Structures are given as C-alpha cells and as structure tokens.
C-alpha cells in the first residue's frame, strides 16, 4: 500500500495534474478570502463551504487518471498477475488523492492564520465545516476513484465523476423539485395523497443529501451519524472499485 501511495502521490507532481489542481484550489480559496477580507467580514466557515461547492470540478481532475491511466498503458495487468492485494491498491490510490487535497488545504490554513493575527475569530463553526470538508473529500474522492476504475479513458472518467458528484450536490434541489412535481401532477385526483407522497419523495431524496445532513456543523452542532454516513458512502464506492478490479483479475486468470 505504501508503495502504491508514494507512486500515485509523486505522479501528481510529475505531470500537470497536481499543479493544476493546487493552482485552481488556491485561486478559488484566494478569491473567496480576498472578497471577504475587502469587506472586513472574514468568515472561514463561509470560505470552506464555498470551496465545497467546487468538489465536482477538482475531484474529477485529481482522480480521473488513478486507474484509467493504468488501463490505458496496460500496467494494470500487474495488479492482476502478481500477489499484490487489490485492497492495498485501492486504499493507496485514494490516500494519495486525499493527501493532495490536504496539501491544497494549506492555503485555507494560511487564511486562518492571517484572520486570527488580524483580530478575526476562528469559531467552532469553522472547525465543524473543516471537519465536514475532509470527510466529504474522502467520499467524493472514492466516487472519483470508482469512475476511474470503470473506464480506460481519463476524459470519460472525469465526466462520470463530474456527473455523479454534481447530482449529489444537487440532491436537495432535485428532491424538492420531484416532490413538488408529483404533488402538482396528482393534486387534482387526491390532494391529500399527492401532498403526502410528494413530501415523502422530497424527504427520501433529501435524506441522501450529504450537505443537508451536515449543515448544522457550521453552527457548532456536531453529529457523528452524519460523519458515519459520509464514511459509509465512501467505503461503498471503494468496495465497488475493489469489485471492479477483482472481476478483472479473475478474467485474467
């Protein structure tokens, strides 16, 4: 696992991918921080929440080649024809992408230091949003890794990850829209039934929304169940990635 981690992590800096991701993240965080600093109302929690909105852009960039590039070059055959554990391959790659995200976040840490030194407040709510940020990063990176496992084309991998992550970020809006649409469609037949089912649809979809589940962290209200949900989804996609690789291994036998 350590060898896989080192190989993938260093590969980010042997190609433009790592530098592009860091530059993009730095630009976005710097823009948000400067906009707040210029008005004299810096809120680290708001900055981190704003950065969470760009998972669907940055995560596909750093995960699109994790497995698809190996497939394209044919080096993935080493995973299937040697005693190496596929579990170690999956964990090593996801940790490499997560480590890159941690490096990108140094930019926000600098903003925190500047804010505190200028007399600003680093609140408990800001701590909560940072915790959620990294748990979400793990979940979305796992999704991106799965997208990279199902194709040998980096562009397709990035598009699949982009769509899945974007839909995840829009679950609240999608849930409200589908619930309202169902209510409007069947209200003429049975208003009470339409309202109940419409609300049930909205509630069911909103239950899956990681952003709604963790919105209270900004208020300093921590919920272990919400973090468990994020980890569980991440582990689910890591398992799916493992199954994709394991199926390919048996096909090589």
Image (cartoon, grey):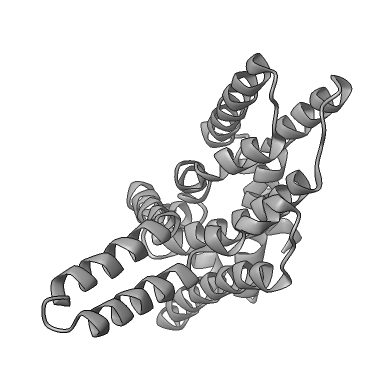
Quadrant where the N terminus sits is: bottom right
Of 89 and 91, nearer the camera is 91
Q: Where does residue 41 sit, x and y in percent of width and height?
A: 69, 24
Q: Where does residue 59 sit, x and y in percent of width and height?
A: 51, 47
Of 194 and 144, nearer the camera is 194
Q: Where does residue 225 sit, x and y in percent of width and height?
A: 68, 74
Q: Is residue 83 visible?
A: yes
Q: Residue at x 67, y 67 (%)?
A: 227
Q: Is residue 151 above or below residue 203?
A: above
Of 58 and 230, nearer the camera is 230
Q: Where does residue 84 sit, x and y in percent of width and height?
A: 65, 72
Left or right of 208, for residue 199: left
Q: Is residue 213 above or below residue 104?
A: below
Q: Is residue 84 visible?
A: no
Quarter assignment of residue 231 = bottom right
Q: Residue at x 72, y 33 (%)?
A: 108
Of 53 and 241, nearer the camera is 53
Left or right of 155, for residue 250: right
Quadrant where the C terminus sits is: bottom left
Q: Residue at x 75, y 27 (%)?
A: 111
Left or right of 226, for residue 146: left
Q: Residue at x 71, y 67 (%)?
A: 223
């Amino acid at each position: 696992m350590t060898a896989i981690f080192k190989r993938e992590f260093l590969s980010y800096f042997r190609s433009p991918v790592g530098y592009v991701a860091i530059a993009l993240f730095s630009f976005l965080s710097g823009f948000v921080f400067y906009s707040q600093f210029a008005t004299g109302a810096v809120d680290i929690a708001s900055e981190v929440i704003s950065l969470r909105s760009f998972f669907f852009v940055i995560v596909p960039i750093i995960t699109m080649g994790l497995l698809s590039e190996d497939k394209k070059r044919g080096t993935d055959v080493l995973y299937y024809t040697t005693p190496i554990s596929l579990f170690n391959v999956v964990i090593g790659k996801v940790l490499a992408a997560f480590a890159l995200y941690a490096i990108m976040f140094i930019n926000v840490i600098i903003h925190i230091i500047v804010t505190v030194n200028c007399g600003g407040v680093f609140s408990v709510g800001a701590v909560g949003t940072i915790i959620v940020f990294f748990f979400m990063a793990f979940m979305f990176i796992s999704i991106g890794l799965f997208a990279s496992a199902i194709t040998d084309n980096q562009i397709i991998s990035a598009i699949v990850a982009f769509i899945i992550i974007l839909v995840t970020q829009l679950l609240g809006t999608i849930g409200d829209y589908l619930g309202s649409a169902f209510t409007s469609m069947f209200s003429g037949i049975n208003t009470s039934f339409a309202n109940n089912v419409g609300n049930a649809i909205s509630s069911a979809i909103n239950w899956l929304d990681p952003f709604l589940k963790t919105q209270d962290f900004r208020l300093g209200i921590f919920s272990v169940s919400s973090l468990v949900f994020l980890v569980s989804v991440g582990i689910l996609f890591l398992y799916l990635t493992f199954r994709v690789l394991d199926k390919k291994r048996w096909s090589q036998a």
